[in-house]
């Protein structure tokens, strides 16, 4: 991923009918936050109402009490009383969106659940070694535990997961000498404290990877993360660059070796099919990535790296401005993915980034592809 500042765009309410229809929102945290969930949003009025309730409850000595929680069908509890959607809410196909750009009105670092209707996962960006908890992840972390539970309940009730993306293109966790086993535990402890549903490993130290120095570090990090974030309670995903699966270029095996050794610990790969100078046509995306990065199209990764098709989530930029190259118009991408579906794939799609990626854009893709 690229940590970029994108212009804010208005997000329209999504039409219904695509994957992961939300659960009915009813009684989560009503007695605590004083808001009926059907009028929940991240508007100033909603935040003021919530803040007033918190201030009043504090004056009355109620702020230490745990909020009353009525679990909805399709939800359960994580450690610390944080609600989460059941794991079946992210069975293939999965639709994932990242959020790094600042949207001033969204003080939790994520949009209200209904503004990303039909997406399954929102990835806060980023947790970093170099900069600490940054950007939208920092916004969420700045909220109190009670506020995070309140916000998380909306996502859980809608069948959505909230995760954090690690590192990104500007972080250097390995170059900074971090032990991957210790780092994995540190990250896992933070994830549990925040009440999040898991992590996305967006490692992008390309120089070290090209030198064959990253594979074992990533294997050890993944083992540590999974030891401390057990499945199926927590999700662990990776976001590798598509060329990193090529074993001819990467003599240490690249991501093919990572998959061989710890693929069973990884729920899916959100493969970055962009910023590589290819993957802009259906042919190069699905069947033949070309001579520069051979054997790294969708079906070539499945064939040569032995990654199950359902674990391969196609990553694309939301707009042409969100990446150097690799963008495909929603209607074109949807038609291309329809061909993939017809050939046995249904992994899903991920996008960099919100707010450029909207529910209406996703609907164009899902309608054309038949992914539901």
Image (cartoon, rainbow, N blue to C red):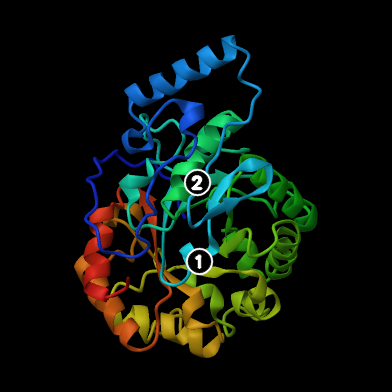
Q: Nearest the camera: 60 or 229?
A: 60
- State left or right for residue 155 relative to residue 22: right
Q: Would you name the residue on which mark 1 appears?
A: 88
Q: Spatial distance from mark 2 to mark 1, Cα to Cα?
A: 21 Å
According to the picture, the residue beneath numbered tag 2 turns out to be 124
The quarter of the picture where the C terminus appears is bottom left
Q: In the displayed image of the protein, which residue is found farthest to the top?
A: 59
At 44% from the left and 23% from the top, the residue drawn is: 50
Q: Earlier in the sequence, mark 2 or mark 1?
A: 1
Position above or below: 249 against 271: below
Q: Looking at the rendering, which quadrant does residue 107 occupy?
A: top left
Residue 199 got which mark? none
SS state under label 1: helix
Horizontal and vertical percent position of residue 273: 41, 69
| Residue 297, visible in the rendered structure | no
Question: Residue 352 at x, y = what percent?
Answer: 39, 55
Q: Is residue 265 visible?
A: yes
Question: Whole-percent x and y of residue 144?
Answer: 58, 28
Judged left or right of residue 149, residue 39 is left
Q: Please, what secondary structure does the residue beneath circle 2 have? A: strand
Which sits in the foreground, 36 or 8? 36
**Residue 357 shown left or right of residue 52 in the figure:** left
In this rendering, is residue 319 above or below 155?
below
On screen, residue 1 versus residue 353, left or right, reads right
- Number of numbered discs present? 2
Q: Position of residue 98 (x, y in %)?
A: 43, 52
Choose top left, top right, bottom left or bottom right for residue 230. bottom right
Crowd tier of the residue under label 2, counting other residues whose Cα lies within 10 Å: few below 14, some 14–19, many 20 or above: many
Which tag is nearer the camera, tag 2 or tag 1? 1
Of 323 and 108, the residue lying toward us: 108
């Amino acid at each position: 991923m690229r940590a970029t500042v994108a212009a804010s765009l208005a997000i329209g309410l999504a039409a219904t009918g695509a994957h992961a229809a939300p659960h009915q929102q009813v009684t989560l945290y009503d007695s605590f936050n004083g808001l009926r969930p059907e009028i929940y949003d991240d508007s100033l009025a909603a935040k003021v109402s919530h803040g007033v309730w918190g201030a009043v409850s504090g004056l009355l000595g109620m702020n230490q009490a745990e909020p009353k929680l009525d679990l909805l069908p399709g939800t359960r509890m994580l450690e610390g009383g944080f609600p989460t959607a059941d794991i079946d809410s992210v069975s293939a196909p999965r639709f994932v969106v990242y959020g790094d750009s600042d949207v001033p009105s969204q003080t939790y670092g994520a949009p209200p659940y209904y503004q990303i209707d039909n997406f399954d996962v929102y990835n806060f960006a980023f947790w970093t070694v170099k900069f600490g908890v940054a950007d939208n992840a920092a916004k969420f972390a700045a909220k109190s535990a009670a506020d995070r539970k309140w916000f998380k309940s909306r996502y859980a009730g809608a069948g959505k997961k909230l995760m954090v993306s690690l590192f990104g293109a500007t972080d250097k966790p390995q170059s900074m000498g971090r032990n991957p086993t210790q780092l994995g535990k540190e990250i896992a402890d933070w994830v549990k404290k925040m009440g999040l549903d898991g992590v996305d490993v967006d490692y992008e130290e390309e120089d070290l990877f090209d030198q064959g120095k990253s594979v074992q570090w990533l294997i050890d990090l993944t083992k540590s993360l999974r030891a401390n974030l057990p499945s199926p309670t927590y999700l662990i995903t990776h976001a590798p660059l598509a060329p990193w699966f090529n074993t001819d270029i990467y003599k240490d095996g690249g991501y093919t070796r990572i998959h061989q050794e710890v693929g069973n610990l990884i729920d899916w790969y959100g493969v970055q099919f962009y910023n590589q100078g290819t993957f802009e046509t259906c042919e190069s995306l699905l069947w033949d990535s070309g001579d520069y990065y051979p054997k790294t199209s969708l079906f070539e990764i499945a064939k040569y790296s032995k990654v199950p098709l359902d674990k391969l989530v196609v990553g694309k930029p939301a707009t042409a401005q969100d990446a150097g190259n690799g963008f495909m118009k929603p209607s074109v991408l949807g038609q291309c993915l329809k061909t993939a579906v017809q050939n046995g794939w249904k992994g899903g799609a991920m996008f960099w980034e919100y707010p450029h990626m909207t529910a209406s854009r996703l609907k164009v893709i899902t309608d054309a592809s038949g992914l539901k």
